[in-house]
Structure formats: structure tokens, C-alpha cells
Image (cartoon, rainbow, N blue to C red):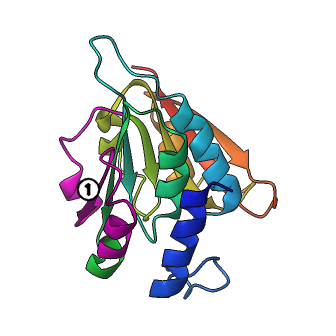
């Protein structure tokens, strides 16, 4: 596990952020699972930069304690930037302190849909704070960019599931469900095609 991720776990423990769904109050956020983190790192390392020297951009909706942020920042290239938004000011301050020495990472306090709008286009969007099934998020992606949502129970039918209906119903996305190694959790992943 990358050192930065271990530091983010320490931040989570210090501020009392739940490390698992079992520790969280029902319906509330918890930390990104290691399988989610590794998947995000794999996508972040692919942010290779665009013509003209401008680096790729990653956006995160819901920073939490910064564990998902740490996985992505640990893997992304030097010319990539990561903008993460957290609505809870105390959490945002703790994560801002964790990334104070990394100019590639910007931690913003506020509702992600408000503070990240207009900051793209993003090459990778990680929706970790709920409400990520907003079709406007696809507009934030560049063509070929990925959107990832965690906290999905594997194998559920699409009908009646807002997250799945968004990922598999938006004609601009090619999507897949990725089951994590614990086989109790999954990610929804979409790539913008147009």
C-alpha cells in the first residue's frame, strides 16, 4: 500500500471517518475500499497528458478522509492535476493538510456539483459522495474520459436502480460493472464515447 494511502488512513482514524460500511451509520459515507483504490490508481496512472503539454485532470466528488484521493495521487503522473471536493469543512481541512506539499492536488470545500462545475474537462471522475448519477457529470468528461462510482452492490438488476440506469442508460457512455475482490462490493465504470 502506498505511503500516502497509509497516511490517509491515519487521517481517517484521527477524524473518526469510518473505514468500512460496517463502521458507518447506515446511508452515510465510508472510506474507499482497497480494491477501489487499486482500480482508481490503475486509471490515474493512465493520465498521460495531452498535446501542448497540458496535463490530464482528475475530479473527485466527495473527498471523505482522502483515501481515494491518495490512491489516485500516488499513481498519477507529475503533469496530472487532481481536484477533489468535500462538503464537510472539517474533513476538507484535514485532507488539505495531508496534501499541502503536493501542488498537483487541490482540495475544495463545498458541494462538488457546484464547485467542480466548469473545472473540466476531466479525464477521470470519481463519484464517491453520492448523487453521482447526474447526467450533467458526463458533460464534465472529455471524450475517452472515465467516470467511476463505488458503493454498489454487485449483481442487482438495472431496473429501478438509479446508478445503473445512469451508467447503462446514457447513450454517451460505454459502461461496465466491476466486482471487487471481496465480491460484496462493485464499481460502475463508464467511458464517454461522444
Element type where label 1 sits in the image: helix
Q: In the rendered view, tell whether residue 19 sits above or below residue 148.
A: below
Which residue is depicted at the point 68% across and 83% down? 22
Instruction: Assess whether residue 104 is covered by the magenta stretch.
Output: yes
Task: Find residue 157 and report its horizontal and vertical position in percent.
Answer: 69, 53
Q: In the rendered view, tell whether residue 180 sits above or below residue 96.
A: above
Task: Find residue 133 and report its horizontal and vertical position in percent.
Answer: 42, 52
Which image quadrant is residue 177 in? top right
Please state the extent of the stretch shown in magenta in the rendering: 93-122
Of 86 and 106, which appears nearest the observer?
106
Left or right: 160 with respect to 130? right
Task: Find residue 155 and report its horizontal and vertical position in percent.
Answer: 75, 54
Of 20 and 169, which appears nearest the observer?
20
Q: Dot 1 corresponds to which residue?
A: 113
Left or right: 1 with respect to 87? right
Which residue is depicted at the point 39% across and 52% down? 60
Task: Find residue 131 and report its horizontal and vertical position in percent.
Answer: 39, 61
Q: In the rendered view, tell whether residue 22 sits above or below residue 97.
A: below
Which residue is depicted at the point 21% across and 47% down? 117
Image quadrant occupied by the N terminus = bottom right
Amino acid at each position: 500500500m502506498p505511503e500516502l494511502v497509509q497516511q490517509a488512513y491515519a487521517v481517517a482514524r484521527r477524524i473518526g471517518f469510518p473505514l468500512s460500511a460496517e463502521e458507518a451509520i447506515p446511508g452515510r459515507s465510508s472510506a474507499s475500499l482497497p480494491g477501489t483504490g487499486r482500480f482508481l490508481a490503475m486509471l490515474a496512472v493512465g493520465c498521460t497528458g495531452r498535446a501542448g503539454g497540458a496535463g490530464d485532470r482528475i475530479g473527485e466528488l466527495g473527498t471523505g478522509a482522502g483515501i481515494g484521493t491518495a490512491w489516485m495521487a500516488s499513481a498519477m503522473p507529475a503533469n496530472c492535476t487532481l481536484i477533489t471536493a468535500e462538503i464537510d469543512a472539517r474533513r476538507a481541512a484535514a485532507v488539505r493538510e495531508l496534501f499541502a506539499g503536493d501542488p498537483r492536488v487541490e482540495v475544495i470545500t463545498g458541494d462538488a456539483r457546484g464547485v467542480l462545475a466548469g473545472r473540466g474537462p476531466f479525464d477521470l471522475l470519481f463519484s464517491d459522495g453520492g448523487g453521482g448519477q447526474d447526467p450533467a457529470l458526463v458533460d464534465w468528461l472529455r471524450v475517452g474520459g472515465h467516470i467511476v462510482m463505488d458503493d454498489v452492490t454487485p449483481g442487482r438488476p438495472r431496473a429501478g436502480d438509479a446508478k445503473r440506469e445512469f451508467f447503462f442508460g446514457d447513450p454517451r457512455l460505454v459502461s461496465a460493472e466491476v466486482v471487487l475482490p471481496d465480491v460484496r462490493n462493485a464499481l460502475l465504470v463508464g467511458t464517454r464515447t461522444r
